[in-house]
Image (spheres, rainbow, N blue to C red):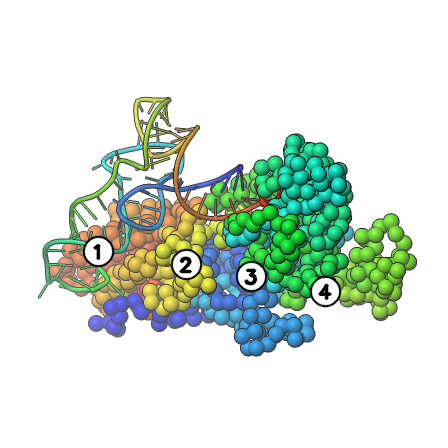
Amino acid sequence: MKKEIPKAFESTIKEKEISKIWDESGVANPEKMEEKLEELGVDIKEPFTIALPPPNANANLHIGHMCGYSFQDAMGRFNRMTGHPTLLLPGKDHAGIQTETSFTKVLKEKGIEKWSMTRGQFYDQCYEFSMENAQSAREQEKRIGLSADYSRELFTLDPKLTEIVYETFYKMYEEGLIYRDKRIINQCPYCKTALADVDTEHELQRGIFAYIVYPFVEKEDKQRAKELFGVEGLTVATTRPETMLGDSAVAVNPKDDRYKEFIGKKILLPIANREIPVIEDESIEIEVGTGALKVTPAHSPVDFEIGSKHDLEIINVINEEGKMTGDIPERFIGMDTINCSKAFVKELDELGLLVKIESIKHEVAVCERCKTPIQPIISNQWYVDVKPLAKEALKALEGGLTVVIPSGQQKALGYFFKNIQPWCISRQLWWGQRIPVWYSGGKKLHDWLRENKDRDISEYTKDTGEEVKGTGEIALGEQAPDESGVWEAETDMFDTWFSSGQWPFSTLGGVNGEDFKKYYPTQVMETARDILFWWVARMMMMSIYVTGKAPFSTVFLHGLILAADGSKMSKSKGNGVEPSEIIDRYGADSLRLWYFSDALPGSNAPVREEKIKGNRNFVNKIWNASRFILMNIDDTELEAIAKHEIDSTLERVIKTGDHIKRVERYLEKFQFNLGAEAIREFFWHQLCDIWIEEIKREISGKEIGSKERVEKLGELLWILKMNLKIMHPFIPFITESVWQELVTLGLAEGILMEQQIS
RNA sequence: GGGCGAUUAGCUCAGCUGGCUAGAGCAUCUCGUUUACACCGAGAGGGUCAUAGGUUCGAAUCCUAUAUCGCCCACCA
């Protein structure tokens, strides 16, 4: 009897051994794999490349990350086993705002306030924090079997990448696509930064709807209003009374018969006691609220539009931290918006100007990262005019150069490109890549000049009380253009997506990189569908802009992993499933197989442990079937069986060949579920339940070393090996483990990972 | 308000360009101590494929409505 083979597949032990073998082989490196293919005498095909989505280096990987890696690894392994030098290019993302938020929390738990640190201190410690997370993420990636080329691993803040990101910025600036603008932005009072529209979410929240009387100035208007409405002014309805000190007008629809006659009249804004006009605007909906809208251009995107149409004054009353500010009564300054709202309601009530308050539920924009309600405020920010980029991306999409799976998401992406808005790329953060801009005489001077185009620089001092110390010009670069000392560095950071949007070519060394020539464009982008607009869209736009070519031909969006009850997993709910626990219990292969059959594009996949357990049973079945075959081969027969030439006309051999082809087709068409089902069905029910049983009978009573035994067991061994190969992209650990058992007996060579399927 | 998708066995879902008695996994039930595996084997039950029309020799599959659910986008005060 040969050495003992355990009855059950001990996944935890085996996975470690196998990982080590793979690491040592080095064939995750495409050049190394190419050499291997040459050795094997195989036709070398086009490289297959995936720039793996870099996970945020601020937390452990979750079950969704593992899902992505499973699909990408399956694609990678399959291509590697069919003659393609394969590059799965790994990396980690600094994830600007998200990491800054989570690291701030980490500090807080230690009793340290972010604001008590210098930017530099914060940056350094955050860097360390990110590196630690990157390390554990790397370990997790390997646990699910990811065959990435770690010799090329990158972090988005790597100087090599930053250089490329800056080059793109300079190019865009010179071509007039980058500009600074003062307009209404989404301000997160908690993160204290501007956000792009796409960085906000809408949440249904409870709020108030206050009906407030805005009295007229003139006596006759008051009287007329009294006759018509019973109050001496127009009643406006608002969910945000605290913004009223920033009102510049009351707008009504010109078709609204109730208010028509008051258009052009003057209103005395309560509390502020400032006169504002009644204006007309088509966009006002007659049925909503009272049909009269208070217009606050500084603090509402809708109002901002109306304001710029009618050239209304912009009055800032809320600052970056969500506190009341500006030219307002002393008692409100510094109040937060909620308390201010309450105070206003009280005062208005005392003045007899509060009609009523309704309690309503309405959609509120919140910060995508910390869920704090955003404050729309006016501020100076950097923008990219992405319209022309989106146009090219749309062309690629419509021309079929990039195909999105599932197709419904392709339409959504097209819609996004068609309706794209300027992209605000500056963030008031400490963590990330600094926007490489310098201001002569300071940022404030530059902005003042931009806002006061018709005025002379000499008036700046009069306006602001500050000396003019430069020209207000801008210079680009990492370093100040000269030593004159007039240059002030931009302190804003890039939106994290500005760098990750360049991932497909920045990781390959940019347009002049060696890797770029060989591996760009990549073949696949595999990710979760919730970052389609943030990331996939940006990658397409920026990559086409910089390289002229669509960065990938297929976008594969895997399904959304949900908690067992079908709800979204979230940290706050505590209903997340820890991938390492699943792997400990059932093995990485079982989890992978579950992804392939359940986490299909366009679907939701609640984690069902029984199903993963079922896959574990299948993995174990493979182990035992293989073990049985090996146990049946006598030591004295090993050599003969190893040398045995397979008869390609045998029925079982033909059927096996057909099966392999079928699964190959499924993998080529990204039909992982069908592939997973096919390998299971074939191995378990065809091979184990039927053929092994048949062969058991066929060799029973035959003498050891006889021709029949060598032929039959040789056939069985061949079928097993073919099955191991085709199953390997799905379940690499078990298949490689069995392969290694074969190697020790001299029945196979090398590692399965580098074998060619046909 | 707009868009996308879903609705098939108790549960989670397959079912590609329309064609055999509609499938899988898990769950359920019955039987089984055969020298790989009980993380097993043999077998069984269970679906008017959301509803109503239509196209067709033929529809879960195509078309049109309806209903319910989900997701995304959008400035409803």
Question: In the image, which disc is placed on residue A755?
Answer: 2
Instruction: Tell me: A317 left or right of A590.
Output: right
Q: Name the residue under label 3.
A: A370
Q: Name the residue under label 1.
A: A692
The residue that appears at 55% across and 77% down in the rendered structure is A110
Tell me where residue A506 appears, x and y as whole percent. Answer: 63, 58
Evaluate whether residue A485 shows in this view: yes
**SS for dot 3:** loop
Residues under numbered marks 3 and 2 in contact, where contact means CB atoms less than 8 Å apart:
no
Cα gap from disc 3 to disc 2, whole angstroms: 47 Å
Chain letter for mark 3: A
Question: How many numbered marks appear?
Answer: 4
Q: Name the residue under label 4.
A: A491
Amino acid at dot 4: Thr
Extreme residue toward the bottom, this view: A111
Tell me where residue B39 appears, x and y as whole percent. Answer: 24, 62
Task: State the image quarter where residue A130 is shown.
Answer: bottom right
Counting residues from the N terminus, which is met first, the one under dot 3 or under dot 1?
A: 3
Report the mark closest to the observer, 1 or 2: 1
Task: State the image quarter where residue A688 is shown.
Answer: bottom left
Chain letter for mark 1: A
Cα gap from disc 2 to disc 4, whole angstroms: 52 Å
Counting residues from the N terminus, which is met first, the one under dot 3 or under dot 4?
A: 3
